[in-house]
Image: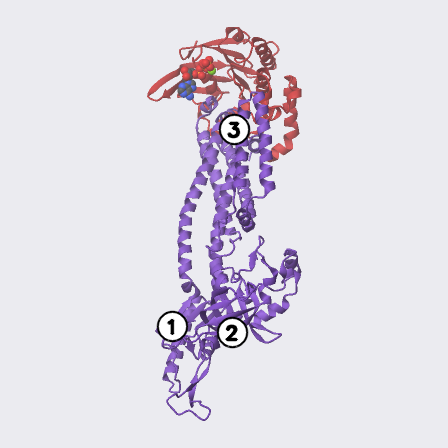
């Protein structure tokens, strides 16, 4: 293209303030859209990932009574083409007696107790990853931790190994894994790590007493059973409801506490023997209230669910037909076999709805941004109408003139998009830090700085007054008021968390940039910048040069 | 009509360089039609300096724009070296303005974002590819500097138009118009916005170019200024008298 277009684009961009405003507008629009979409889609991704982290792909559940002969069923499941791993567990509600406070009266909390087989459970879920007190995976990770992080100060490899087997390996006592927020001890830091509120109550040094209530086949409550567990570690799944409520203990102990373990069946109608025992006429099999299954790579949860349901039907038919089986498994229709998505539907549905809402809001945001960009370019190009007339008079073609403004729009669109993406990236990367900062009262230095700036601005207002510059007086007055306003706002600001982990599902705001969306948004912004410049430029190129020259 | 004794016309052939024949131009303002030029004719010979005199609103600028290919007549013909300008394609017309015509306006019409040197260079950068620009850049810049120096603007190369006086701006505008060695200089009240003394120096500059062989058509409503031309025509009631 001709040389003059390049020269003019460069001069139009470099000698005026308005392109900077346009770049800022485009950048802010892009950043806004990218940030909100990234956080929203990150939220959904988290939800999806957490489903697998917490419960694998398919869950078979028959609460309270449990499924007998579950080991045989698991063996069947593992033969399925789609199943990679499976694990039994017993889930119930129970009471935890915490070690704190000092003195004889301790805190007692209710909790969701999951009795698991740690080795197979870790194959189905991502238990290892959620264990908190463990050595850093790499020296870099260790260096990234704060000086006073307990994970940096002591060797946690022993605790980590204990957690993986749910046992205090030194004494052989059964261990318990607590959700990070089950105790009141752990305090979340700004960097997302935890410190014990009082190092004396750091949970892995203590024991808890778990009390569970067995329920009979008739649905009545029997005598409750208690047992002491060594806290071997704590887990952080990132899902607040889980981290607040869940406690893991070994499956065997759980079954015993709930009387779901293997036990002899005795005939109480017969005559007891010399030591007062009734004759044994069979064995009641151990039970599991849930079986979690993980799909092989490439198998969807839905496909696996169908396979598992068929396997269960077979298992049920086979057990029912076997005359030696006294305790039949529940019929298929009473057993819930669901994918994790179905189990989490209560949670996912509102998020999906929210996403729909967001889509609508975004379409509006996009339109507003597009309109804004169009308006800015319209005014920029209109102001240049006379220049267009001049250029035509000295021989510039209509296409040449159009091209100047297309390049102008393109440059502003690209720079603005770049700025917007960079800004969005910075904000998204630090969104949790920003959020935590908002959650605290403003630091003194910050508002003092604002008041000092306001004082400076006030001085400039006075100076402008003495020189009777109306515009300067106006601008500096506005600046002073704005700075005083921000400073006062900061003084009055009492920390509040917009994203309260107690209310929202996840403990942290997703901080991954949605790059696909970012590129689309950037391209959109560029297109609208070019369009915004092209429409008035085409109009200007269309009007005859004489008219353009007369344009005021 | 009368040739200046020292002039060496660029087009040795006698006859007419640029002419308008019975041109009609009517502006439409809503439902009302305003006939500005009713049947105007003018012949400009090579090397000639013609002044067009007329009262305000008589259509002087309109006629000049038609001659310069900036506007098209409703009827009648504009011819340049015997070619029918009205029949030019859009791109041929752009080239005509760029290569053969130099415009000077009453309000200077410099581009505010470009400095003096860049404003002067501008016509040379239009219609030239990047490759040719790279090859001929030095030569083109030299010519722009030479013109500006000749007009006493050697210390103003990097200044913006806003930093110049009216007379200085008009000198830049003339340098720009001459940049591409046009065949005809079309000046629309070039001194209309200047005081008498400054206006005189501008007219001296035009006279100097004219002596060197440049054909000039100048619009004015001041007969003293018109007196500096070789020939004066009057535009009255949409016709050249
Ligand atoms: N684009 C236009 N639309 C409508 N009317 C126009 C347009 N351009 C010019 N006119 C009208 O045409 C008439 C002649 O205009 P022109 O500019 O040619 O006059 P002029 O002789 O140059 O006047 P002046 O000496 O004031 O510059 C004026 O009445 C003007 O209002
Ligand atoms: Mg005029």
Decide if residue B124 is in sight here: no
Judging from the image, mark 1 belongs to the subunit labelled: A
In the displayed orientation, state which residue is furthest to the front: A104
- Residue A552 in percent (x, y) is at 47, 22
Q: Residue at x 38, y 81 (%)?
A: A328
Q: Which mark is residue A396?
A: 3
Q: How is the image coloured?
A: by chain
Disc 3 or 2, which lies upstream in sequence?
2
Tell me, yes or no, whether dots 3 and 2 are on the same chain: yes
CA gap, disc 3 to disc 1?
80 Å
Q: Residue at x 44, y 90 (%)?
A: A276
* Label 1 Cα neighbours within 10 Å, binned few <14 / some 14-19 / many ≥20: some
Chain letter for the red colouring in the rendering: B
| Residue with the mark numbered 1 | A335
Judging from the image, mark 2 belongs to the subunit labelled: A
Tell me, yes or no, whether dots 1 and 2 are on the same chain: yes
* Label 2 Cα neighbours within 10 Å, binned few <14 / some 14-19 / many ≥20: some
Disc 1 or 2, which lies upstream in sequence?
2
Judging from the image, mark 3 belongs to the subunit labelled: A
Q: Residue at x 53, y 51 (%)?
A: A513
CA gap, disc 1 to disc 2?
30 Å
Chain A drawn colour? purple
- Residue A412 in percent (x, y) is at 53, 38
| Residue with the mark numbered 2 | A227
CA gap, disc 3 to disc 2?
91 Å
Q: Is residue A271 left or right of residue A243?
A: left
Q: Quadrant of residue A270?
A: bottom left
């Amino acid at each position: 293209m001709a040389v003059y277009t390049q020269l003019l684009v460069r001069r139009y961009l470099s000698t005026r303030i308005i392109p900077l405003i346009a770049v800022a507008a485009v950048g802010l629009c892009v950043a806004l859209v990218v940030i909100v979409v990234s956080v929203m889609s990150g939220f959904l991704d988290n939800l999806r990932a957490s489903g697998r982290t917490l419960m694998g792909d398919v869950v078979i559940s028959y609460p309270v009574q449990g499924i007998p002969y579950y080991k045989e069923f698991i063996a069947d499941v593992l033969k399925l083409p789609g199943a990679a791993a499976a694990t039994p567990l017993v889930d119930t509600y129970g009471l935890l007696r915490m070690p704190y406070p000092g003195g004889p009266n301790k805190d007692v909390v209710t909790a969701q107790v999951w009795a698991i087989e740690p080795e197979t459970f870790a194959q189905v879920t991502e238990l290892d990853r959620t264990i908190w007190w463990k050595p850093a995976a790499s020296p870099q990770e260790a260096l990234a931790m704060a000086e006073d992080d307990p994970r940096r100060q002591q060797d946690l490899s022993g605790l980590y190994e204990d957690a993986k087997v749910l046992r205090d390996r030194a004494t052989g006592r059964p261990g318990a894994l607590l959700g990070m927020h089950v105790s009141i001890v752990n305090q979340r830091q700004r960097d997302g790590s935890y410190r014990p509120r009082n190092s004396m109550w750091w949970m892995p040094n203590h024991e808890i007493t778990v009390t569970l209530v067995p329920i009979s086949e008739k649905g009545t409550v029997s005598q409750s059973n208690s047992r002491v567990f060594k806290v071997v570690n704590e887990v952080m799944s990132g899902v607040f409801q889980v981290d607040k409520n869940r406690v893991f203990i070994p499956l065997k102990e759980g079954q015993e506490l709930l009387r779901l373990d293997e036990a002899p069946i005795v005939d109480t109608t017969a005559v007891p023997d010399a030591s007062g025992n009734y004759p044994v006429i069979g064995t009641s099999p151990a039970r599991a209230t849930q079986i979690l299954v993980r799909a092989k790579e490439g198998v969807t949860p839905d496909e696996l669910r169908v396979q598992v349901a068929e396997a269960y039907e077979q298992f049920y038919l086979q057990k029912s037909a076997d005359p030696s089986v006294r305790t039949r498994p529940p019929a298929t229709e009473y057993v819930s076999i669901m994918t994790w998505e179905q189990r989490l539907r209560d949670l996912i549905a509102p998020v999906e709805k929210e996403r729909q809402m967001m889509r609508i809001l975004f379409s509006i945001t996009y339109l507003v941004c597009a309109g804004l960009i169009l308006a800015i370019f319209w005014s920029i190009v209109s102001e240049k109408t006379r220049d267009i007339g001049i250029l035509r008079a000295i021989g510039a073609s209509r296409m040449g003139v159009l091209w100047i403004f297309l390049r102008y729009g393109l440059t502003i669109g690209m720079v603005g998009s770049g700025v917007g993406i960079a800004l969005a990236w910075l904000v998204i990367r630090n969104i949790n830090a920003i959020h935590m900062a908002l959650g605290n009262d403003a630091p003194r230095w910050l508002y003092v700085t604002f008041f000092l700036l306001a004082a400076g601005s006030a001085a400039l207002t006075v100076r402008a007054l003495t020189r009777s510059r109306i515009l300067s007086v106006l601008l500096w007055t506005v600046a002073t008021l704005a700075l005083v306003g921000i400073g006062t706002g900061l003084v009055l600001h009492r920390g509040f968390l917009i994203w309260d982990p107690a209310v929202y599902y996840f403990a942290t705001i997703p901080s991954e940039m949605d790059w696909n969306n970012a590129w689309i948004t950037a391209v959109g912004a560029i297109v609208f910048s070019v369009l915004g410049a092209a429409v008035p430029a085409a109009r200007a190129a269309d009007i005859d040069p004489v008219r353009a020259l007369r344009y005021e | 009509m009368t040739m200046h004794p020292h002039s060496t016309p660029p087009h040795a052939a006698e006859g007419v360089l640029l002419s308008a024949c019975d041109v009609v131009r009517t502006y439409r303002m809503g439902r009302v039609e305003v006939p500005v030029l009713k049947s105007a004719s003018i012949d400009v010979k090579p090397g000639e300096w013609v002044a067009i005199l007329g009262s305000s609103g008589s259509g002087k600028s309109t006629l000049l724009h038609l001659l310069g290919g900036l506007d098209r007549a409703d009827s009648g013909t504009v011819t340049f070296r015997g070619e029918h300008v009205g029949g030019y394609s859009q791109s041929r017309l752009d080239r005509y303005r760029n290569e053969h015509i130099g415009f000077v306006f009453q309000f200077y019409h410099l581009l505010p974002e470009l400095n003096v040197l860049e404003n002067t260079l501008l016509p040379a950068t239009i219609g030239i590819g990047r490759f040719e620009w790279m090859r001929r850049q030095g030569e083109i810049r030299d010519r722009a500097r030479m013109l500006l120096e000749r007009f006493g603007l050697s210390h103003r190369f990097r200044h913006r138009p806003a930093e110049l006086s009216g007379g200085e701006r008009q000198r830049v505008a003339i340098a720009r118009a001459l940049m591409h060695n046009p065949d005809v200089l079309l000046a629309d009240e070039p001194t209309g916005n200047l005081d008498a003394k400054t206006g005189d120096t501008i007219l001296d500059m035009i006279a100097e170019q004219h002596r060197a062989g440049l054909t000039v058509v100048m619009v004015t409503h001041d007969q003293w200024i018109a007196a500096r031309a070789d020939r004066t025509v009057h535009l009255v009631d949409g016709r050249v008298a």
